[in-house]
Image: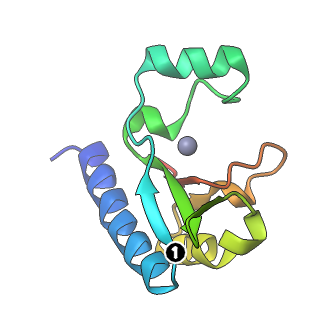
């Protein structure tokens, strides 16, 4: 098994833990992007939706999740912070986009590989 596959598998196990944790906290979670093609990344990069051509989405080590509370989609970083901190507690490699400097990306959870 390649080291990247091992990282991808560990990432996905942490995602399952994250979803269970957030659900227990009362969130309703739906899935957004996980793997992203280089072609799609370039579209996001050119439009400004992404600031990098080196996204962990390209390596299957990032996921965007939608957080609903009382049926409403929530983007507020402070409301999701407990979940983001839980994510970062699962592995020293985990980063929550809500803690990014400059380009804050609240729905984004990644494993740095
Ligand atoms: Zn993302």
Q: Is residue 65 shown above or below 84?
A: above
* Residue sitting at the far left: 1
Residue at 43 percent of width and 31 percent of height: 58
- 5 with respect to 62 (left or right): left
Q: Nearer the viewer, residue 58 or 93?
A: 58
Circle 1 residue: 27
Q: Nearer the viewer, residue 64 or 66?
A: 66
- 1 with respect to 104 (left or right): left
User: Whereabouts is ligand 1, in terms of quadrant?
Assistant: top right
Q: Is residue 81 shown above or below 29?
A: below
Query: Where does the image place residue 77, in percent across and percent down from the top left?
Result: 74, 64
- 28 with respect to 95 (left or right): left
- Per the image, label 1 sits on a secondary structure element best described as loop
Question: Could you classify mark 1 by the number of other residues whose Cα lies within 10 Å: few (under 14), some (14-19), or many (20 or more)?
Answer: many
Quarter of image, res 42: top right
Residue at 37 percent of width and 58 percent of height: 11
Query: Where does the image place residue 35, in percent across and percent down from the top left?
Result: 37, 36
* Residue sitting at the far right: 102
Query: Where does the image place residue 54, in percent across and percent down from the top left?
Result: 56, 29
Query: Where does the image place residue 102, in percent across and percent down from the top left?
Result: 84, 45
Q: Nearer the viewer, residue 95 or 80?
A: 80
Q: Is residue 54 shown above or below 2?
A: above
How many numbered marks does the figure carry? Answer: 1
* Residue sitting at the far bottom: 24
Residue at 58 percent of width and 15 percent of height: 43
- 44 with respect to 76 (left or right): left
Ligand 1 within 8 angstroms of badge 1 C-beta: no
Residue at 59 percent of width and 23 percent of height: 53
Q: How is the image coloured?
A: rainbow
């Amino acid at each position: 098994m390649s080291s990247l596959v091992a990282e991808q598998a560990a990432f996905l196990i942490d995602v399952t833990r994250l979803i269970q944790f957030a659900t227990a906290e009362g969130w309703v979670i739906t899935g957004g992007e996980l793997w992203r093609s280089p072609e799609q990344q370039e579209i996001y990069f050119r439009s400004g939706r992404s600031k990098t051509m080196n996204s962990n989405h390209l390596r299957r080590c990032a996921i965007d999740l939608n957080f609903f509370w009382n049926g409403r989609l929530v983007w507020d970083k402070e409301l999701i912070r407990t979940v983001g901190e839980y994510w970062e507690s699962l592995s020293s490699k985990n980063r929550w986009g809500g803690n990014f400097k400059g380009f804050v990306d609240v729905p984004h959870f990644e494993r740095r590989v």
